[in-house]
Amino acid sequence: MAGILEARPRVGYFYAGKHTKNLIAEKIREIKVNDIKSVPVVVKEDASVYDAIVTLFVEDVGTLFVVHEDGSLAGVISRKDLLKIAIGNADIRQIPVSVIMTRMPNLITCTPEESAYDAARKIVVHQVDALPVVKAEEINGKIKYKVIGRITKTIITKLFVELGSN
Ligand code: ADP
């Protein structure tokens, strides 16, 4: 009964005391990042800005994640990061993405266990378009973040539409 009414033997239905507003909030917080994440699009840190722009078009994404040789998260590059360097006089075939990316530890990330609500909130609070979904791993005694997905404004918008149409 959508949580508004609860059933008890020999008593029948009774009002569970929850307001519809709380139920919506509860429902949204039940959805996990893992349920809605999509595949990450990554480039190596020595990839050129030119290659990153090509990847952006080929993969049809707005944000790229940059990874170290071992596959762990090194940085994030947005559309405007690429535009900024491309409109200057720089030779974008020679400049590696590591020069222009926003790097660790300044990255806003989320985990698969986190709620979709928390991820959406991070996107709003930090004014970014995408978050890497990461899993912490110990590699050679150091904590590294393996990139296992991405959460974007588009994914959150699609979820919003899906929730609204149910
Ligand atoms: P755009 O720059 O195309 O408007 P964003 O708003 O996502 O796209 O990015 C704004 C700035 O924040 C960029 O310099 C980008 O490198 C950085 N950025 C993007 N995503 C993240 C993130 N998850 N964590 C930290 N910085 C980010």
Image: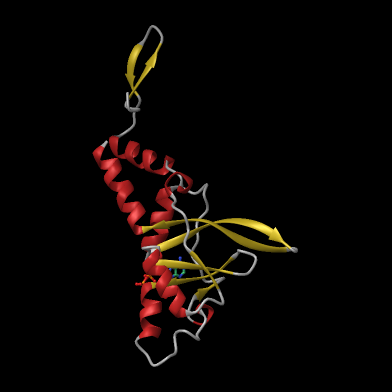
Q: Quadrant of residue 19?
A: top left
> In the image, what residue occupies the spot 33% across and 15% down?
13
Left or right of 56 on screen, residue 19: left
Question: Which residue is outermost to the bottom?
Answer: 89
Q: Please name whichever residue, 50 or 28, is drawn nearer the observer in this view of the structure.
A: 50
> In this rendering, does residue 127 appear at all?
no
Residue 164 percent location from the top left of the image: 25, 42
Horizontal side of residue 15 vs 72, given as left or right:
left
Ligand 1 positioned in quadrant? bottom left
In which quadrant is the C terminus drawn? Answer: top left
- Residue 11 against residue 79 in the figure, above or below: above
Residue 122: which quarter of the image?
A: bottom left
In this orientation, does residue 58 appear? yes
Q: Position of residue 91 (x, y in %)?
A: 44, 89
Q: Residue at x 29, y 39 (%)?
A: 21
Image quarter where the N terminus lies is: top left
Which residue sits furthest left? Answer: 165
The answer to which image quadrant residue 2 occupies is: top left
Q: In the rendered view, does 146 fall on the left or right side of 78?
A: right
The percent position of residue 138, horizontal first and vertical second, equals: 70, 59
List x then y, in percent, for residue 78.
40, 72
What residue is shown at x 37% (from left), y 83% (from top)?
A: 84
Residue at 35%, 27% (x, y): give it: 3
